[in-house]
Image: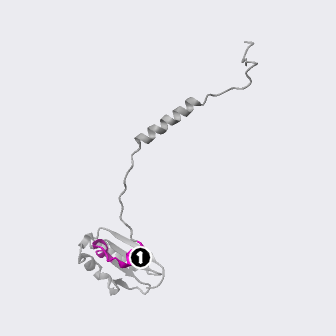
Amino acid sequence: MARRFQQDENDGETKVDMSPLIDCVFILLIFFIVTTTFVDEKGKQMPTPDSAAAAEPTDEESTVVMLEITERGEVLHEGQAVGVGSVQTLIQNSPKGRRSPVVIQAVGDARVGLLMRVKEEAERSGAETISVTHRHGGS
């Protein structure tokens, strides 16, 4: 036990052979390149500002029931004032009926209570998709 660790007097440094490590990295790289699959994600083409102004609304865009709630407590549909009670009728009479997406947009400091009543009416009509948004500023 007198000899613990002997080092050659000629060899002052310990050397590490890096070539097996590099070979292993290249093999892993080739493996991952070969096994990688690429997914072609399909999406909707977004119009640019120039083409959006010239384009007419698509069938999907024209069937959206857009309701706007103003700061004065008015409920507007296509610029026309409508009552909260007529929200169900608007949705049911839209081209796609209950499948038409409904967008409720509160403008500025619109009342939350009115927004909730309009949303409840849209839910009662059986609308499948209801979105609520907020826009700053006046109508």
Q: Nearer the viewer, residue 35 or 123?
A: 35
Magenta residues span 48-65
Q: Is residue 74 left or right of residue 20?
A: left
Q: Which residue is mark 1?
A: 50
**Image quarter of residue 135:** bottom left
Classify residue 43 by image quadrant. bottom left
What residue lies at 23% left-to-right and 75% top-to-bottom?
95
Where disc 1 sits, the SS reads helix
Image position of 74 (left or right of 128)? right
Q: Is residue 49 magenta?
A: yes
Give residue 34's position: percent from left, percent from top. Answer: 41, 40
Q: Is residue 38 magenta?
A: no
Percent x, y of residue 39:
37, 51
Assess disc 1: are there few (<14), some (14-19) or many (≥20) residues with their C-alpha within 10 Å of its C-alpha.
Answer: few
Name the colour scheme.
one colour
**Residue at 28 percent of width and 74 percent of height:** 63
Q: What residue occupies the far top of the structure in this picture?
A: 1
Count of numbered badges drawn on the protein = 1
Q: Residue 116: which quarter of the image?
A: bottom left
User: Where residue 91 sits: x, y (%)?
Assistant: 27, 76
Residue 122 image offset from top left, x and y in percent: 31, 74
Residue sitting nearer the eye, 28 or 104: 28
- Quadrant of the image for the C terminus? bottom left
Residue at image location 72% in from the left, 12% down from the top = 1
Amino acid on which disc 1 is placed? Asp
- Using the image as rendered, state which of residue 73 and residue 103 is in the foreground: 103
